[in-house]
Structures are given as C-alpha cells and as structure tokens.
C-alpha cells in the first residue's frame, strides 16, 4: 500500500475479514458487534493508524452535541468519550471556558486508608464556548511514570487542580493537592504556563503557612489578590491564606476557620461584595450534607448559614461533593455550582452534577433539576 495513502474503513475491514459496515459499527460505538470482534477491530484501528476524515469527525461531534445540562448523567466530550475532569475548576479566558480536573481513567484499586483510589494519570483540560460541549485538549500536567520519587508519580495523589490567571506576570498558575498514597504528606503543588491549555511546568510543592493541606481551592478577588483555601490540621479546620503578588507562595497572612468542624471541598465565589464558601463534610468518597458560609472579608470571620441544597437527596448533596463555583459570562447574577458524584468502586466513572444557583436576598439555593440550560439565568 502507498505509505502516503490514508487507511480507509475498507482496509480495516479487509484486514479483519469483516464487512466495512461492521467496522463502521465499531467506530460508531454501536452495541451489535460481538465483544471479541469489536476488540480485534479496535486493535487494528490503532495499529493501522486509522484516523477518521474531518467530515466523519464532524458527524461524531453532531451526534454528541448537547444543548442542556443533565446532572448526574454520563457527560461525553465532543468525540463521545466521557469527560475526565474530576475535582475540577473552570477558567474563563478570552471567550473560552477551560475545564481542568483530575483524569481518573484508570482501574480503581483498594487503598487501606481510604478504601478506594486510582493511580494518578494527571490533570486534564477541556475547552468550550457554550459550557455544554467540551473538546478534550488532553493532559496539561501528566503524571510521571518513570520516577517513583517524583511528586507527580503515578503512585501519588494529584487532586483538585485549580487554575487562575495572574495579570502581573501574565502566567496561568495551577494549584493542586499533592500527596502520597496514604494521604499523610498533604502538600500543595504548583505548576505554571504561559497559555491556559498547557503544557504546564511543574514547580514543586510546599506547605502553606507551615500547615498541612488537602482539599483546596484558589480564589482570585476583583482587586487581583488571590487566596488559597485549604483543609488543614488533619482536615479539622479550613485555612484561608493570602497569596503573594505572583500567586506562587503564601504571604504569611492567613486565618483558621470552621475550627474543628472538619469541612473540605471548598468552593468560593463573591457576589454583591460578599464572599460565599461552600464546603462538604469529611467522609471521603461518600456523600454528606453541604454547608455554606458568608463573609464580608475572605479572611473571615465566616458566618455559617446552612445547607443550600434543595430537592431529593439534598442532605447528601445529591450524592455528590462540591468542586467549584463560577460566574457565567454574559449573564448577570448567574453562577454554576459544580459537584463530583463519586463512584468509589470505579472512580474513573464518577459523574458530574452542575446546577444553577438561585438567590433569595443573599441566601443561596442549589435545587436539583434533571435537565436545564442557561436560559434559566434570563436573557
Ligand atoms: C474526599 C476529597 C477527595 C478525595 C477523597 C479521597 O474527601 O474531597 O478529593 O481526596 O476524599 O477519599
């Protein structure tokens, strides 16, 4: 065969001894192909370097096109693969949304301390202009395979990546929870990049204000200052620490909040001059009741208001855990709360729950909705 010629569906069919229709069915994820035939054809597709034409790729995109949010349902990227961006965050940059999160697309294993876990794969990034349809941009900070001492080694914990843009240095700064498999090291990892979508350069890790740090988030305020919020003191308290002007270290200014209340998974936003902090309780992959607090100053004091969730299973946060809250561009007073619906026995198949926030005065309500779209925020 001419080496410059693209492999066609017919070539694969010939090599596999099946009809081109069968190859098409495999390419289109149709269920009516025997498992062994499917696997054999998939192997040939890789070996023979088959890549679908632009027209075929467009067809796939049309097939997976979404026009609404379906909380808790499988959410595929525009090529039909389930999105792998757990414990994530959204960065809005130049008209594009970037969704960063943990790629957990690897088998779940038993872990003596926390029950279940997966090997680290790295931080993935997806982009979208409408928030429904996401293009996979790949791993922007891959785990390290060949150096067991590296903090990003596949045997380690890489969780809850959060990315903010620093206007001063014009760099994108990624914070994440780094840990050893037993969750005893509890450090903050840092990576930077000149573009939003990577590849990020890993700078190393530190202990913010000499404290341990597990679940975390980063909040960038309107004045350009940023803060690291993290569970500390063995998850018993939540620290809010001011970050340096380049966002690469803590300044030493910090407060201890929700002392001995064991809150984690912080998600923070600002509305009408007030800071909101949504957290979960501390039960690993298992769901519990969310709680939010309000403050005039991000460093506190924080006033606990209660559980903002409403509807079936609101006391278990709809079987999910907070990840991030972000304002929607082009709408006023529009915020989306992102949650992870963990499936602890097969963590890579965990789902996402995105819900709109409704405000009653300054109180926030996050009500379960089976299906919704951005028109809920008005025009
Ligand atoms: C949760 C935490 C997750 C993950 C998990 C491990 O409490 O929010 O990010 O660390 O524990 O059990």
Image (cartoon, rainbow, N blue to C red):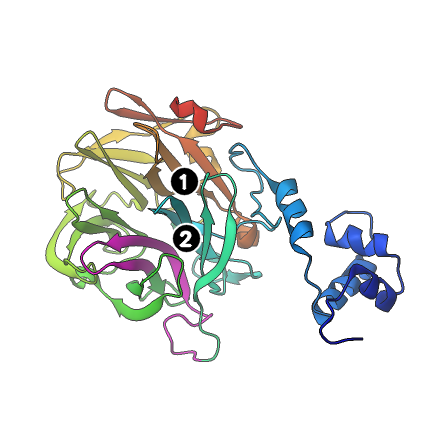
Query: Which of the 4 quarters of the picture holds residue 169?
Result: bottom left
Q: Nearer the viewer, mark 1 or mark 2?
A: 2
Q: Is residue 284 above or below residue 249?
A: above
Q: Would residue 336 be found to the left or right of residue 230 on screen?
A: right
- Cβ at disc 1 under 8 Å from ligand 1: no
Outermost residue toward the top?
A: 360
The residue at the point 77 percent across, 54 percent down is 26
> Is any part of residue 35 visible from this angle?
yes
Q: Is residue 329 above or below residue 196?
A: above
- Does the stretch in magenta take in 125? no
Looking at the rendered structure, the number of numbered marks drawn on it comes to 2
Tell me the residue that label 2 is attached to.
100
Q: CA distance from mark 1 to mark 2?
A: 12 Å
Q: Which residues are magenta?
A: 147-176
User: Of marks 1 and 2, which one's residue comes earlier in the chain?
Assistant: 2
Q: Residue at x 22, y 48 (%)?
A: 237
Q: Find residue 75 and report its horizontal and vertical position in percent.
A: 56, 43
Is 357 or 138 nearer to us in this picture?
A: 138
**Residue that badge 1 annotates:** 338
Indicate left or right for 171 with 86 as reference. left
Helix, strand or loop under label 1 = strand
Q: Residue at x 29, y 70 (%)?
A: 203
Whether 174 is among the magenta residues is yes
Q: Could you tell me which secondary element the residue under label 2 belongs to?
A: strand
Q: Is residue 289 visible?
A: no
Q: Position of residue 244 (x, y in %)?
A: 14, 58
Locate residue 22: give its quadrant.
bottom right
38 with respect to 57 (left or right): right
Can you give x and y, in whole percent of width and height, for residue 308 in the image?
34, 28
Q: Above or below — where is 373 with respect to 51?
A: above
Q: Split into 4 quadrants, where in the image is the C terminus?
A: top left
């Amino acid at each position: 065969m001419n080496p410059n010629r693209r492999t066609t569906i017919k070539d694969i069919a010939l090599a596999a001894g099946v009809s081109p229709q069968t190859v098409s069915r495999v390419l289109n994820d149709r269920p009516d192909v025997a498992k062994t035939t499917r696997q054999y054809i998939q192997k040939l597709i890789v070996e023979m370097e088959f890549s679908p034409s632009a027209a075929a790729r467009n067809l796939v995109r049309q097939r997976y096109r979404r026009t609404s949010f379906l909380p808790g349902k499988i959410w595929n990227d525009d090529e039909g693969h389930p999105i792998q961006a757990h414990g994530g965050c959204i960065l809005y940059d130049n008209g594009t949304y970037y969704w960063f999160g943990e790629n957990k697309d690897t088998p779940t294993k038993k872990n003596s301390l926390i029950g279940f876990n997966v090997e680290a794969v790295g931080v993935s990034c997806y982009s979208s202009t409408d928030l429904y349809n996401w293009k996979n941009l790949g791993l922007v900070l891959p785990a390290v395979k060949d150096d067991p001492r590296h903090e990003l080694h596949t045997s380690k914990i890489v969780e809850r990546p959060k990315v903010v843009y620093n206007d001063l240095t014009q760099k994108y700064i990624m914070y994440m929870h780094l840990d050893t498999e037993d969750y005893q090291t509890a450090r903050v990892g840092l990576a930077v990049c000149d573009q939003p979508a990577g590849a990020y350069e890993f700078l190393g890790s530190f202990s913010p204000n000499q404290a341990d740090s597990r679940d975390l988030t980063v909040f960038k305020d309107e004045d350009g200052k940023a803060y690291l919020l993290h569970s500390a003191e063995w998850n018993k308290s939540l620290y809010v620490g001011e970050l340096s002007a380049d966002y690469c270290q803590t300044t030493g200014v910090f407060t201890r909040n929700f002392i001995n209340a064991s809150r984690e998974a912080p998600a923070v936003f600002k509305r009408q001059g007030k800071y909101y902090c949504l957290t979960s309780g501390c039960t690993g992959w298992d769901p519990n009741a969310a709680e939010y607090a309000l403050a005039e100053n991000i460093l506190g004091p924080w006033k606990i208001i209660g559980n903002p969730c409403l509807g079936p299973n609101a006391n278990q946060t709809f079987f999910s855990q907070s990840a991030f809250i972000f304002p929607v561009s082009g709408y006023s007073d529009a915020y989306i709360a992102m949650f992870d619906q963990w499936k602890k026995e097969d963590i890579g198949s965990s789902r996402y729950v995105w819900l709109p926030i409704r405000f009653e005065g300054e109180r926030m309500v996050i009500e379960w909705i089976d299906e919704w779209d951005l028109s809920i925020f008005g025009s």
